[in-house]
Image (tube, rainbow, N blue to C red):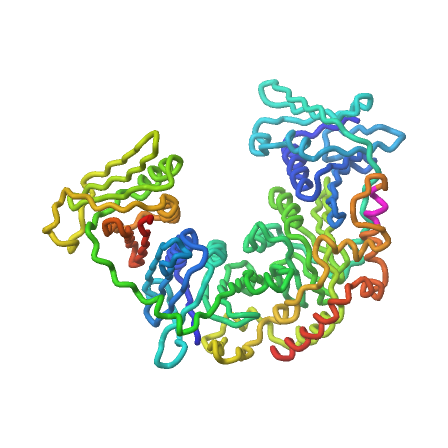
């Protein structure tokens, strides 16, 4: 295999690798006919990312014919080849990637200014195929936005924040932080941001879903999108079904597939009516003058419900967390597997496919995977809603 | 009990954010006392804080373009809340470009102060980000702790040297000892001293000047008033300062307490560090 990347594309390649490092510890490399595929998956198999660089991305693209070559390597070692992207941009003229099958090595040679050659020999291991099964086009909700809009949204959330919840209506998208357990709820700061449909290049909502996924992994994609300026497309369906984020241009395609928390469907159905009836909260919020919120808070008196403007529907309804936490969410989707732990003997793709296999199962089976505790949660939420209304 | 304040001026927003950030660096939690004219960030000097006390006073009119509040009862026009300034600081820092920022006392899942910022966007609808920061309402029976303590009769009052210089000196001294002696006299001299078995280090500041209206002139100007303090508390105070104040002075009660007073654009910040027992 001989691939040569020149000029600005070296930085793009480097950025892609840094983005992939936000997902998992290993980089899966697979030179294909349609381009070089770089993939990564996280240890709990709840996040997958793939960058496919078309042959035109390279100034030279020659891959081994015949047998399918696949390998994986520690992503940190590949990152060290592309560390300090700023200097890379200024000094590297081209990057040559070569395969030494006898020594099980991938050689990255950076041709820099002044005739300097930096050669990195990285050992790889053979690996099974890693490929997610997902269908963007079958998703109910599709959006496309300039990366700046999304970067400006996530900046309001602390970098340590694990999960974020995205809720959509016909004209709006709400993004807020997701707080897992009740105890944290009373201490944690809750942040919510609302984006209007016209901030997006494309905004098509067929169902008012609310999904929760890992922000850290989402930021990984934004890292790449922001530096390349490519618009980000987002595809998602009901909770439990993965969210797909992609960036494309004529010579590359990046897809980040993130699992979402399985939520209870009834929660959303009961809310959808509310969504349609209530005026959109951000407008009210901005034009309110005093009297918006009253607090009946004397330590002796029992606290009363809030009056006047009800909180935005997303706040009232989605406040209660679904019981499965992030790490165990894969269990609900991988119930075919005996254990959620990584089994080195088992080929990774089988476990991985189950993540998405779960998403094509009819909704009822997803409901069954819910731990029973969510049932109680649902009941008290309905009460909150009526109070707010 | 109601509170609603709105900031639309960008300089005011900036200044308010800096004040909140400074407070957040000094303490993890403090009391916010709201009156019709002022906001106070208070940390009562308790044993649990190591005796450190803080009192920061802001004139609300200098920050808020709109300010409305109603106290706990119609006679008592005050609200006391226990707040954690760090999330406020984080929330405010990300909305510096906002067209307006509103702070409201609200009741969501619990009592919160909601920071709501209207962000500029290219679209027709403004983008609003809200941060709900949980707070605790403090019952009236505990309020006497948060009244302004009388300023003690201090022995020496002196202007502080540039805080950056003090900070670098204290940072280095912290590596050698846990305790630092602060002493000053009415001649405008101040010394910061540490002493260990192996070494003693003293940094001398001269010609600092003494504020007027200080302690009685009958005191010998050469005699130093000194206090031994926990160096980390002094370091924490210095770490939190982001802007050079227009006035910075230090009142010392011999072997008792160091009272640091900073004044910057009508915000006064007082910090009490007790002597180590």
Give, as a single range, the part of the protein colored magenta: A348-353
* Residue projecting furthest to the top: A115
At 64% from the left edge and 30% from the top edge, which residue is drawn? A80
For this rendering, which residue is in front, A358 or B210?
B210
Vertical order, A22 against A313 (above or below): above
Find residue A107 and report its horizontal and vertical position in percent: 73, 24
For this rendering, which residue is in front, B130 or A149?
B130
Vertical order, A65 against A240 (above or below): above
Vertical order, B114 against B254 (above or below): below
| Image-based side of B62 in relation to A339, left or right | left
Find residue B23 and report its horizontal and vertical position in percent: 40, 55
Instruction: From the image, give the main secondary structure of the stretch colored magenta.
Output: helix
Residue B97 seen in the figure: no
The quadrant of the image that shows the N terminus of chain A is top right
At 72% from the left edge and 59% from the top edge, which residue is drawn? A324
At 23% from the left edge and 38% from the top edge, which residue is drawn? B205
Find residue A110 and report its horizontal and vertical position in percent: 65, 25
* Residue projecting furthest to the left: B218
- Magenta includes A140? no
Count of labels in the image: 0
Within the image, what quadrant is residue B44 found in? bottom left
| Image-based side of B182 in relation to B45, left or right | left
The quadrant of the image that shows the C terminus of chain A is bottom right
- Magenta includes A349? yes
Residue A143 seen in the figure: yes
Find residue A156 and report its horizontal and vertical position in percent: 54, 55
For this rendering, which residue is in front, A89 or A342?
A342
| Image-based side of A231 in relation to B50, left or right | right
């Amino acid at each position: 295999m001989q691939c040569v990347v020149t000029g600005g594309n070296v930085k793009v390649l480097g950025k892609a690798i840094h983005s992939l490092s936000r997902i998992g510890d290993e980089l899966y490399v697979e030179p294909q006919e349609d381009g070089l595929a770089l993939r990564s998956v996280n240890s709990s198999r709840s996040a997958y990312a793939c960058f496919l660089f078309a042959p035109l991305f390279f100034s030279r693209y020659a891959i081994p014919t015949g047998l399918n070559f696949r390998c994986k390597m520690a992503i940190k070692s590949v990152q060290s080849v592309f560390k300090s992207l700023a200097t890379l941009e200024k000094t590297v003229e081209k990057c040559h990637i070569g395969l030494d099958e006898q020594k099980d090595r991938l050689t990255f040679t950076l041709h820099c200014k002044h005739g300097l050659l930096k050669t990195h020999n990285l050992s790889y291991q053979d690996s099974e195929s890693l490929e997610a099964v997902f269908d963007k086009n079958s998703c109910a909700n599709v959006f496309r936005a300039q990366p700046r809009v999304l970067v400006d949204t996530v900046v309001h959330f602390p970098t340590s924040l694990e999960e974020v919840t995205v809720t959509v209506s016909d004209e709006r998208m709400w993004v807020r932080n997701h707080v897992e357990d009740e105890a944290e709820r009373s201490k944690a700061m809750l942040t919510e941001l609302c984006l209007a449909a016209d901030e997006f290049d494309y905004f098509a909502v067929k169902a008012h879903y609310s999904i929760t996924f890992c922000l850290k992994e989402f930021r990984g994609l934004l890292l790449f999108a922001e530096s390349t300026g490519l618009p980000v497309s987002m595809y998602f369906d009901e909770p439990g079904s993965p969210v797909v984020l992609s960036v494309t241009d004529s010579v590359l395609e990046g897809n980040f597939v993130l699992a979402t928390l399985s939520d209870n469907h009834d929660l959303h159905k009961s809310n959808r009516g509310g969504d349609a009836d209530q005026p959109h909260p951000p407008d009210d919020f901005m034009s309110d003058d005093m009297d918006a919120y009253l607090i009946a808070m004397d330590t002796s008196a029992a606290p009363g419900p809030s009056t006047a403007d009800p909180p935005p529907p997303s706040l009232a309804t989605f406040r209660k967390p679904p019981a499965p936490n992030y790490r165990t969410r894969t269990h609900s989707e991988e119930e075919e597997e005996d254990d959620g732990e990584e089994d080195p003997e088992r080929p990774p793709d089988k476990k991985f496919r189950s993540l998405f296999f779960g998403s094509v199962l009819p909704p009822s089976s997803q409901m069954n995977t819910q731990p029973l505790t969510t049932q109680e949660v649902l009941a008290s939420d309905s009460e909150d809603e009526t109070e707010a209304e | 009990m109601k509170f609603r304040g709105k900031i639309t001026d960008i300089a005011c927003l900036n200044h308010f954010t800096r004040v909140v950030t400074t407070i957040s660096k000094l303490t993890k939690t403090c009391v916010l006392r709201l009156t019709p004219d002022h906001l106070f960030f208070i940390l009562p000097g308790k044993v649990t804080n190591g005796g450190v006390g803080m009192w920061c006073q802001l004139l609300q009119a200098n920050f808020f373009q709109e300010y409305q509040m109603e106290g706990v009862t119609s006679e008592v026009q005050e609200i006391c809340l226990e707040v954690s300034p760090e999330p406020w600081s984080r929330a405010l820092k990300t909305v510096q470009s906002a067209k307006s920022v509103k702070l409201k006392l609200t009741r969501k899942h619990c009592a919160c102060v909601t920071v709501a910022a209207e962000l500029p966007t290219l679209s027709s609808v403004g983008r609003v980000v809200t941060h709900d920061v949980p707070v605790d309402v403090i019952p009236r029976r505990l309020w006497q702790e948060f009244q302004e303590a009388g300023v003690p009769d201090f022995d020496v009052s002196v202007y502080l040297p540039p805080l950056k210089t003090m900070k670098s000196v204290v940072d280095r001294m912290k590596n050698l000892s846990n305790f630092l002696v602060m002493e000053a006299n009415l001649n405008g001299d101040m010394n910061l001293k540490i002493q260990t078995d192996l070494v003693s280090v003293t940094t001398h500041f001269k010609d600092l000047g003494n504020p007027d209206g200080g302690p009685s002139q009958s005191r010998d100007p050469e005699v130093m008033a000194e206090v031994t303090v926990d160096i980390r508390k002094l370091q924490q105070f210095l770490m939190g300062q982001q802007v050079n104040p227009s006035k910075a002075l230090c009142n010392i009660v011999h072997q008792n307490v160091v009272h640091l007073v900073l004044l910057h654009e009508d915000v006064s910040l007082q910090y009490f560090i007790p002597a180590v027992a």
